[in-house]
Amino acid sequence: MLSEPKNERRDSRDSFSPAPDGLRPEQSRRVRAALLDSIARDVAHPLALLAGATASLKSNKASSNPAVRRELLEVIETETERIQRFASLLIDMARLECEGLELRLEAVPPADIVSGALDDSGSLPQHHKIDVNVPVDLPLLCVDPAVLRRVLLLLLEDAARQSPPGSTIGVHAARDREAVRLQVLDESEGIPPNELPGIFSQLTLPCEDDTSRARGGMDLAVCRGYVEAIGGRISASNRTDGGGAVFTLTFPLAG
C-alpha cells in the first residue's frame, strides 16, 4: 500500500514529457559551482584524516599497539568509503551535466528494478529491516534499468543515513491509473516543511559528518536529474502513517 503524501514537494513536470537532452544552462552553472565547492570543502576533511591516520600507522608507537592500530585502520576504511561515495556522486553529476546522456530504454518489470537495487545495497539490509511490497504483476516501465536502479539505491542509502539502526525502510509500488508509482519510505524524523521546497536543489553534500540528519544534498539532486532524464517525476513528502519521509517516483506505463 502506497503512502499518501503530506506536505508534498514535487520537483518535476506536472505531466510526463520526453526526457531532456541534458541540464539547462542555469542548472549547469549551479552544478559546476556546487561541485567546486563540494570538492574544496568535502574532500579536504577526509583526506586530512587519511593522511593523519596513515602517518600515525607508520610510527612505531602506534603500530605496536593493537587497539590503536585497529582504530586507525577503521578511520582509514571509513574515510576511504566516504571519498569513494563522493567520487561516485561526482561521476553521476558529470553524466547529468553532459548533453546527450546515453540511455538504454527498455520495458522492464518494476519488481526487477527493485530487486536489482536491493542487490546493489551491500550491507544496508544488515542494519535495517527492508519491507518490500512490489506486486510482480505490475505493468512494465519503459526506463533505463541501470539508471533507475541507481536512483533507488541512492534513495535507500539516504533513508538508511536518516533513520536509526534497526528501523524499517519500505520499498512499495502500485499502479496509479496510467502510471506506476515507486516509493521509498523511512522511519526518520521526517523533512521539515521549510526544507521541502529546496529538497532536490541543494547540490552541496555534507560529507564532513555523515551522522548529520540534514536532508538534501548531491544525492537527491542526482536522483532528480536521473528521474527526469528517463521521463519520470520525483516528489518528497512526510508520511501520514507515522514518522518519517517518503520519496515517490512516478513513471508512465511502457508504450
Image (tube, rainbow, N blue to C red):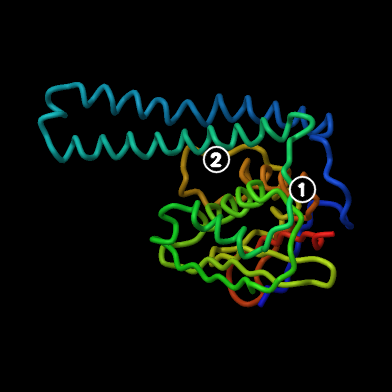
In this orientation, which residue lies closer to the viewer: 20 or 221? 20
In this orientation, which residue lies closer to the viewer: 238 or 226? 226
Badge 1 amino acid: Ile
The quadrant where residue 30 appears = top right
Residue at 81%, 60% in the rendered image: 252
Mark 2 and mark 1: Cα distance apart in space? 27 Å
In this orientation, which residue lies closer to the viewer: 215 or 183? 183
**Residue 21 % position (x, y):** 83, 36
State yes or no: discs 2 and 1 in contact (Cβ < 8 Å): no
SS for callout 2: loop
SS for callout 1: loop
Residue at 80%, 60% in the rendered image: 254
**Residue 155 % position (x, y):** 59, 54
The disc at residue 2 is: none
Check disc 2: other Cα within 10 Å, few if <14, some if 14-19, many if 20+.
some
The disc at residue 206 is: 2
Quarter placement of the N terminus: bottom right
In this orientation, which residue lies closer to the viewer: 182 or 253? 253
Is the residue 246 above or below the residue 76 in the image?
below
Q: Going by the image, does 123 lie left or right of 188?
A: left
Residue behind mark 1: 230
**Residue 36 % position (x, y):** 63, 24
Is the residue 92 above or below the residue 247 in the image?
above
